[in-house]
Image (cartoon, rainbow, N blue to C red):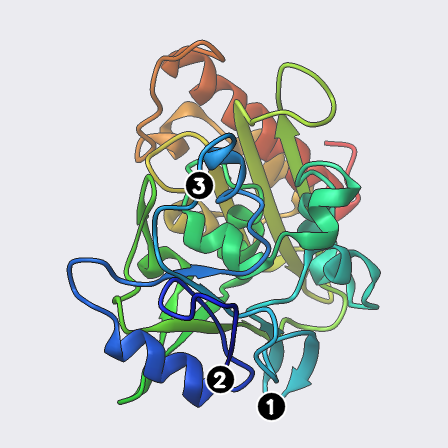
Amino acid sequence: MGATSDAARYLQPSTLPDALTALAGSLADQPLTVLAGGTDFYPGRVGRPTDVPLLDITRVAGLAGIHRGEGGWRIGATTTWREVIETPLSAAFDALKAAAREVGGMQIQNAGTVAGNLCNASPAADGVPPLLALGAEVELASSAAVRRLSVGQFVLGNRKTARAPAELVTAIVVPDWPAGTRSAFVKLGTRKYLVISIAMVSAVIALDAAGNIARCGIAVGACSAAAMRLAALEQRLVGMAPAAAIQSISAADFSGLTPIDDVRGSAAYRIEAARVLVRQALAQATGSAG
């Protein structure tokens, strides 16, 4: 296991078994903090030394890259946002690529990871709504077992996830969608770039031979403690023509959201913004002018 001169405070393993052994052996009162891109960890500690033991997983073999697997795609835990942008993928991933371009500037996209965005669990994390809408699962490994949770089961609230101290996120697994599936990501902020969301929406849409909605995933971020998939709305839209579906969106479809009032917008404004953004995302994903 590679390490710096202070192995007790900074570990940099090169294999997954070594990383999992380190997590299993860390003290309960001071568990290892897993570090990948560090784009959230380090800015929060500017001007003061690191005061927690770190497990740097950037050199762990097999955790990087996007690969085709049986029944879907596997996004490794250390895959960066730049890799998401540059990897050739179907239009079902257009929303995730659009979100990737919103994650800070190019320097952040080159270092920040998809799994890190999930583990950070910010209500306004740009990558969460596209992964929710795609029906992605988070793969968690420990020395004892491997399990998968849906993104909605994994991200529990503001800065809170279902990851146990001895577990490491190893991948995000995205299931296959029908051929021709398209997606869109729409974000509202106080300016165009480098901004925290007031509200954001991702929509993934598959149409049938008649041009009606056959399958869809719709998720809203920054309007509750964790981004939410609108399952009831998704079910209601199946079988509808895109234009009719867009026009049918109403405030009642967002009753499950629990937005807050803050300096970026009121709760009422966020609900209305979510309604407008869902319409825009559906229009983009279906190529509809509705």
Residue 147 seen: no
Q: Which image quadrant is residue 54 in?
A: bottom left
Q: In this rendering, which labeled residue sits more in front, label 3 or label 1? A: 3
Q: What is the C-alpha distance between the residues marked 2 and 1?
A: 32 Å
Residue under label 2 = 1
Marks 2 and 3, how far apart at CA: 24 Å
Q: Quadrant of residue 257?
A: top left
- Which residue is more in the foreground, 171 or 53? 53
**Quick check: marks 3 and 1 in contact, CB under 8 Å?**
no
Which label's residue is closer to the chain start, 2 or 3?
2
- Expressed as whole percent of the image width and height from the top left, the position of residue 40 reads 52, 42
Q: Label 3 amino acid?
A: Pro
Residue 148 circle label: none
Disc ID at residue 70: 1
Q: Which-is-in-front pick, marks 2 and 1?
A: 2
Tell me where residue 150 appears, x and y as whole percent: 39, 65
Q: Is 233 displayed left or right of 126 in the figure?
A: left
162, 28: nearer the viewer: 28
- Residue 154 horizontal/vertical position (percent): 34, 60
Question: Which residue is the extreme one toward the front?
Answer: 5
User: Which of disc 1 and disc 2 is earlier in sequence?
Assistant: 2
